[in-house]
Image (cartoon, rainbow, N blue to C red):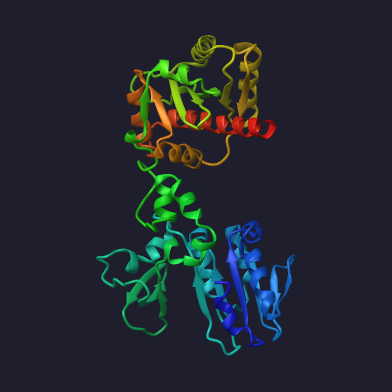
Amino acid sequence: MLLEFLRHVNNPGFGAVIFRRTAEQIRMEGGLWDEASNIYPLIGAKGREMQLDWTFPSGARITFDSLQHEKDKFAFQGAQICGLGLDELTHFTESQFFYLLSRNRSACGVRPYVRATTNPDANSWVKRFLEPWLVVDHPFFAKSGEIRHFIRDGGVISWSFEPKQDSKSLTFIRATLYGNQKLLERDPGYVANLKSLSLVDRARLLDGSWDVVEGGNLFRAEWFGFCEVSAIHAAGPTNRVRFWDLAGTEAVGGNDPDYSVGVLMARDEDGILTIEDVQRVRERPLGVEKLIAWVAQRDGSLVPIRMEQEPGSSGVAVIDRYRRVVLAGFDFAGIRSTGDKTERAKPLSAQAENGHVKLVRGNWNTDFLNELAQFPTKGAHDDQVDAASGAFRELVKKRAVDLAFS
């Protein structure tokens, strides 16, 4: 995309704007600004990093901008953007995209046009927009690079093989990492990085799949190995942690409340994770406290205990009570989670898929694997996933600290 608009920079009236959803994405390491700084000065362009724009000797300009919030699109009311670029199209909303199309106009002599790049996302509006290229039985099915024409009226898109009055042309060109031979030569390890991702992210980013969706894809039972308790102690894992995800409701009648779950996880010197024990209960807060205190005594004082801290003053109060009363004398702390549950689970998913997670045989194994196999499914329990993800994050964090001080 950075090279695309250079074909018109000898036209003094030409202007292009390349959008990312946030300004931070433009400025991030190896992002649009960094890459443009490697290219544009070679043909005499002058850049202004504060304004995020480049001016070429003819007077033509290429600007970078963002649309972090939905309302930001109205900042371009009245704008004339001859070359309109959108990097990572699935990050933008449908209304942002089509509103910007109304700004794609110019009298500079270059026919206004749009270029966009994207990674696949089966849940995005972009997949619906690209159905002629992605759905094989679509009535206007198109191969990669073939052109189709559309008219959008009231949010409804009508397709045709040939141009019609007021229609716009569109094509979609598939690409994968393996088509970028220069990148593979410069960074051959990048393929390995993508292969180490979770099943869903790898299918999207490496294989270019528009069909894979979250839900039953993050974990598979066959990814987990099994071992005996004796093998754990013989291996002498260097790190252990018990992570709790709390719920405070008991099962009454036909209700199906969340569980309070505590996952005990170990990590050895080779990075192999072992889930040694899972405790799961549906009780009122006092019953949960008694279980956690009993489990702490059984695990021993050398095992750190971490607990997800809910937002707000109530979360602070719960952690404070556990620190002062329930778990006094233990290495205990509350942890505030960031990001959604699925994103937090993906690193553990990648470890499991690569065969780096084992389970100690126990009567909890079946329920644990069943829950992971259907995660994230709307309405299904995910408490064991949350606790296991939290334990893994804490072990990784501790490992990073140990390495820093070794």
Q: Can residue 88 be seen in this view?
A: no
406 relative position to 19: left or right: right
Residue 32, placed above or below residue 59: above
Q: Where is residue 103 in the image (x, y as percent from the top left)?
A: 57, 76
Observer-nearest of 158 and 341: 341
Furthest residue toward bottom: 109
Give the image location of residue 43, x and y in percent. Answer: 67, 80
Q: Is residue 40 above or below residue 386?
A: below
Q: Tally the marks.
A: 0
Q: In which quarter of the image is residue 326?
A: top right
* Left or right of 321, for residue 215: left
Pick the front one: 230 or 314: 230
Q: Where is residue 175 in the image (x, y as percent from the top left)?
A: 42, 66
Identify which residue is drawn at 39% across, 25% down: 359
Q: Residue at x 63, y 23 (%)?
A: 333
Q: Nearest the camera: 175 or 23?
A: 175
- Up/down of 306 relative to 49, above or below: above
Residue 248, percent from left and from top: 49, 21
The answer to whether residue 212 is visible is yes
Quadrant where the C terminus lies?
top right
Residue appearing at x 42%, y 60% in the figure? 125
Quadrant where the N terminus lies?
Answer: bottom right
